[in-house]
Image: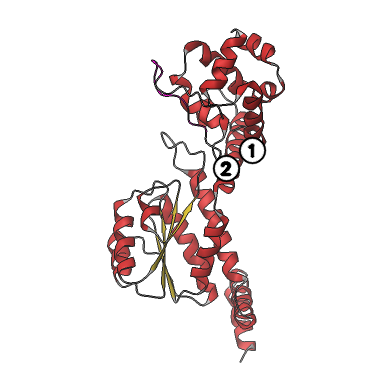
Amino acid sequence: MSTTTPRGRPNGPGIHVGPDRLLLDAISEALPRLRRSEQKVARAVLDDPHRAVHASMAELARVAEVSEPTVMRFCTAVECDGFQGFKLRLAQSVAFGVPATYSSIKPGDDTSSLVEKIFDYTISSLARARNVLDDDLVARAIDALATADEILFLGFGASQIVAQDAQQKFPLFGVPCMAPPDAHQQFIAASLAKPGTAVVAISNTGTTTAVLEAVEVARRGGAIAIGIAGSASPLTERCDIPLIVETLENTDFFTPMHSRLAQLALIDVLATGVVVRQSPDQLERVRDAKAKVAAMRSGPSRLLDELDGER
């Protein structure tokens, strides 16, 4: 990492590219703040990252229509240690998949282009979430859920969908679960929380006031709080076990689908982690419950026949 940063330059702050930050994301976000000549290099990199990874400095300068010193200044602007350091960081970013951002979708795109861009973006976003997720904190959350007497899931809007999905999974393990959809019901349930209650609060922004208030009152009652958010936020600060599910979300025009998919995947991880801690008897009860659900889907007569056979 270069000790020279672009902070304080006349045209505004530079780019912070930390070790957990993908270079392509940082370049995209800071593009307007770069000098005009550096923007040419940035666009050449973003237009074809794979080519940039293998290009020499002279080749990248030729594609961007700038001088080689401008390429070096660009590398410094993105806080990389020279051109080779820039290429190393770029290769790491490309390894996670080049995101086809929603901003690149154009009115004239055909169906095949839409499918390719949205699926590629989703895959890249899930890879980012997995890369940032703290496995040790996930293990602590699994332990808390596996030993809880009851579980309360909190969330609104898109996060309520995740809470409802979780509420369907965890009762199979013999633990009473709630995911009230109404704000008043959530607050009442949180007010009744006690030691042995695990509260799972879900909010991509981590700033939803009703969720924060419910978490606060639940913790005062002795509950342990697990927070699932898209970044460090007031929610993660208030929870005993903060789980950050960081995605490449663009919420300017779209419902946060990628954050929801990542949160659903995390719920599956937590549920599976609880499963492997169950006793053989409880696992057998789970299998029996799933078998009954399968019979119910085949029609009521088959389910009733199976229940009659158990008498």
Q: Which residues are magenta?
A: 9-17
Work out whether residue 195 or residue 156 is closer to the camera in this orientation and state it.
195
Disc 2/disc 1 C-alpha distance (Å): 7 Å
Q: Is residue 24 above or below residue 302?
A: above
- Where, quadrant-wise, is the C terminus in this rendering? bottom right
Q: Is residue 291 above or below residue 50?
A: below
Rate crowding at label 1 as few (under 14), some (14 to 19) or many (20 or more) other CA atoms within 10 Å. Answer: some
- Secondary element type, mark 1: loop
Residue 156 visible? The answer is: no
Work out whether residue 74 or residue 148 is closer to the camera in this orientation and state it.
74
Q: Which mark is residue 96?
A: 1
Mark 1 and mark 2 in contact (Cβ < 8 Å)? yes
Task: Check residue 108 for magenta coloring.
Answer: no
Q: Is residue 191 above or below residue 241?
A: below
Which residue corresponds to the image point at 41% horizontal and 61% vertical from the top-left?
240
Residue at the disc numbered 2 = 128
